[in-house]
Image (cartoon, grey):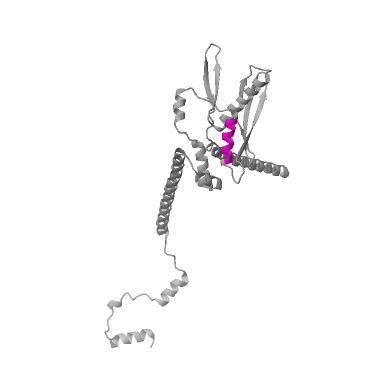
Amino acid sequence: MLLEEQLKIENQNLKDMLAEQRRKDKASFAMHLAMVKMKIEQPKKSHKVTVSLKSGGSYTYSYADLADVDKAIMKAIEKTAVDGKPLLTYRFEIDNGAEGVSAETVIIDAATGYEERTNRVWFKNVNVGKAQDSASLISYAKRYSLSAAFGIASEDDDDAQAQIRNQEQTIDKAGIEIIVNEYLKDKTDKSKKWIKGKHDKATAEYIMQLIGKYKLDQHLENNKNKQIEKRKEKHEKQISKKSRKVAAKSEDEIIKDIVDKPKADPFENEKNDSQVTAGQQDLFNSVLGE
């Protein structure tokens, strides 16, 4: 039984250790992904395609092809490399089935090997058997998946509201918070280098906002702790005064006080210096036997 219990404990310790390592790897991955994404420059939509509708008519839209998207991401990975080593890399998993094509982007943390997968996208292949058309569909699926993984808008958005939003400068707040927290709590070289690097106005303002909030929270927490310590010290002094008592003297100390410090005569003030009479003296002598 002892051996069985020991094995259970060791097994649980191993599970806990692996879980903690995975948590650290996931945090590292999140920070690296955020750093890369914030260095990506949106690729130009230099390609155009016209789509014919079955109901008649057509529409044209612009897009950045797979090579443009890949180039934008690789530039960001190069910019964020540490000592020439990339933070991230990625690969595709493609399934070219009988009815359609599916693609999935697997992003890998180059430092730890930790990886995460995007949601698999699937497109119906209406030109099964035509190699060129199938290859184009695979390329489209890759571009769609890769763009989603790294937050790239590779195609025009016809939604008027989306166009308005795209005109505004947007930032990855979650990613910035991860890096700033890493910088404030652990002071890692990577986060420090990123914080002190060049940023657009919106990103820089959000960084300062987070750091300012952290410093304010720290200041308030320090003041709170000081007040608690003062109250605690005051309370302890009050208790000390109430509980302080005069220690009882030992028997030897009492005897010493009697010998060294005799009590004052209570009749000291009532004494006089009158002479003893002859009769009184005779009485004393009689009592004392003299």
Residue 54, placed above or below residue 133: above
Q: Nearer the viewer, residue 56 or 17?
A: 56
Q: Quadrant of residue 22?
A: top right
Res 130 seen here: yes
Residue 157, placed above or below residue 175: above
Task: Please state the horizontal and vertical placement of residue 266, each as a whole percent of the image.
Answer: 32, 74
Quadrant where the N terminus lies?
top right
Tell me the residue at 69%/43% (across/down): 5
Q: Which residues are magenta?
A: 67-78
Q: Is residue 248 left or right of residue 190?
A: left
Task: Please state the horizontal and vertical placement of residue 218, each as a whole percent of the image.
Answer: 45, 47
Residue 120, placed above or below residue 110: above
Task: Please state the horizontal and vertical placement of residue 116, each as a whole percent of the image.
Answer: 61, 34
Q: Nearer the viewer, residue 238 or 173?
A: 173
166 in the magenta segment: no
By secondary structure, the bulk of the magenta-drawn segment is best described as: helix
Q: Is residue 21 left or right of residue 155?
A: right
Quadrant where the C terminus lies?
bottom left
Tell me the residue at 50%/40% (across/down): 177
Q: Nearer the viewer, residue 74 or 281?
A: 74
Q: Quadrant of residue 64?
A: top right
